[in-house]
Image: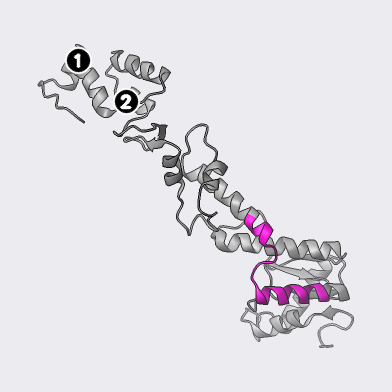
Amino acid sequence: MTDVVIDFKWDEFAWNYADHAYHSYGGGWYGTHGRYDMKAEAESAATARGFGLIDGGNGNPLEWWSLNGYYSCDCGLIRTRVNYENAVKTFELAGVECWEWRGYVAYDASSRRGREIAAEIGASLTGYPVLDDERLSELEWDAAVEYINDQCGLPEGVDAADVLREMPEVPPCMHCFSCDAEDVLTSFGYSSCMDCSAWIKADGYPVERVCYDCADREQEGDCSCIPNYVDTLRHMSLYPTASDLREIQRGCETCYPIRWPHGDAKVGM
């Protein structure tokens, strides 16, 4: 090892990692030339006199996490964030320098306490893939709330957290697990507009109804029959059906000849 560095401390995992993985240097992912890179990175990123990596529990180094540059599924992303936060916080509390090296958590292996922390984290992750279940649950909750707000088109006055509390369990990943938001909203007394799928409060209505925006779009020219009817229902917090709107226009002297120039006004739409 003295051909690489004389007064620089390596941990065994980082040294072996440099030897045994494929990379462009040849002879391992980083090999001898890679150790020079590790040393240079340590000295430029910190005042460290050593270089170490943490076993992520699967033979690969523990990943570094940041707010930018992640487009993967929440299943892995949240777990990566939890383990990263836990490891970095533990090093910082112990006064051990750590930094990002090629997407991984590197630390000053010249610190005895640092090496102990790395060994403890590696052993923990080998037995169980998450360092903090409470933080994992918190981030899964936040991700689920964000997904429901963005993707489920919640009706006004309904909070994503309220919907999530009614689910049997918080999905660990909204991209890989089905979202039961529609079932929950139905239990809250909402139904979807038959034209645009927007949620409307229609407790107990046996017939599918349309929202006010879709109903307003049925207006013909400047005729006020539909707007007047919709405004009346709006003040009563009621919603029309498609057949309601058709019947209003059937009885309108302005709309009828426009909608049914040949007199073919069938019931239903």
**Residue located beneath label 2 in the image:** 240
- Given residues 47 and 258, the one toward you in this image is 258
Q: Position of residue 163 (x, y in %)?
A: 52, 43
Give yes or no for contact between labels 2 and 1 (Cβ–Cβ under 8 Å): no
- Residue, x 14% and y 27% (percent of image)? 266
The reply to whether residue 218 is in sight is yes
Q: Quadrant of residue 139?
A: bottom right
Q: Position of residue 253 (x, y in %)?
A: 19, 11
Q: Quadrant of residue 91?
A: bottom right
Question: For numbered disc 1, what is the local secondary structure?
Answer: loop
Q: How is the image coloured?
A: one colour
Which amino acid type is marked by label 1?
Gly
In the rendered image of this protein, does residue 94 appear above or below residue 9?
A: above
Question: For numbered disc 2, what is the local secondary structure?
Answer: loop
- Residue, x 70% and y 66% (percent of image)? 131
Q: Quadrant of residue 127?
A: bottom right
- Count of numbered circles on the image: 2
Which amino acid type is marked by label 2?
Pro
The reply to whether residue 45 is in sight is no
Q: Quadrant of the C terminus?
A: top left
- Given residues 77 and 205, the one toward you in this image is 205
Work out how far the residue at label 2 is from the one at label 1, CA to CA, in angstroms.
16 Å
Q: Which span is picked out in magenta? A: 116-137
